[in-house]
Amino acid sequence: MNQGGGRNFQFAAELIHYDLPWQVSKIEQRIGRLDRLGRKRPVVVSNLIVARGGKEEAWLNCLSQGLGVFSQSISGLEFALRDVELDVTLTSQRR
C-alpha cells in the first residue's frame, strides 16, 4: 500500500491481508480504508493468509484473540498505553 497517501475503499466487500505487519496501527489503517462514511456494508470482513505453525500464526492469534484487532478498533489503546508508560517512567525516576 502507498505509504504517502491512501485510498478509501468503502465500496469493497472484503479485505485480504497477504502479509501481516508487525505494527498494529498499519493493520488498523488497512481496515480503516474500508470502514469509511458512506459504507453500505456494516462490517469489514478481513481474510488473512498466514503460514501455520510460524511466527505469523502466533502474531495473528495475539492480534485476533488477544487484542481483537479484526473485530473492533483499538486506536484509543495507543493513547492509554502512552499515559501508562509516562507514569511508569516518572515513578521510576523518583526512586
Image (cartoon, rainbow, N blue to C red):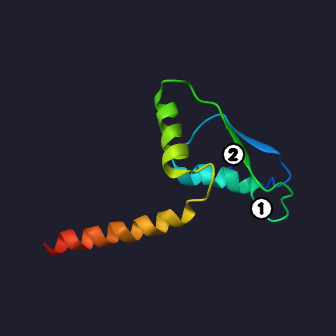
Q: Is residue 92 left or right of residue 81?
A: left
Q: Nearer the viewer, mark 2 or mark 1?
A: 1
Separation of marks 2 and 1 at Cα, in angstroms? 17 Å
Displayed quadrant of residue 90: bottom left
**Residue that badge 2 annotates:** 1
Comparing 40 with 18, the one in front is 40
Q: Are marks 2 and 1 in contact (CB under 8 Å)?
A: no
Comparing 78 with 69, the one in front is 69
Label 1 sits on a secondary structure element that is: loop
Q: Amino acid under label 2?
A: Met
- The residue depicted at 68 percent of the width and 51 percent of the height is 31
- The residue depicted at 74 percent of the width and 50 percent of the height is 44
Q: Which mark is residue 36?
A: 1
Pinpoint residue 95: horizontal percent, then vertical percent.
12, 72
Q: Is residue 18 left or right of residue 61?
A: right
Q: Earlier in the sequence, mark 2 or mark 1?
A: 2
Pinpoint residue 81: horizontal percent, then vertical percent.
41, 64
Displayed quadrant of residue 16: top right
- The residue depicted at 73 percent of the width and 55 percent of the height is 33
Pinpoint residue 12: horizontal percent, then vertical percent.
83, 48
Q: Amino acid under label 1?
A: Arg
Number of marks present in the image shown: 2
Q: Is residue 23 left or right of residue 73?
A: left
Tell me if I can see residue 6 in this picture: no
Tell me if I can see residue 16 in this picture: yes
Q: Is residue 5 above or below residue 47?
A: below
| Quadrant (top left/top right/bottom left/bottom right) for the N terminus | top right
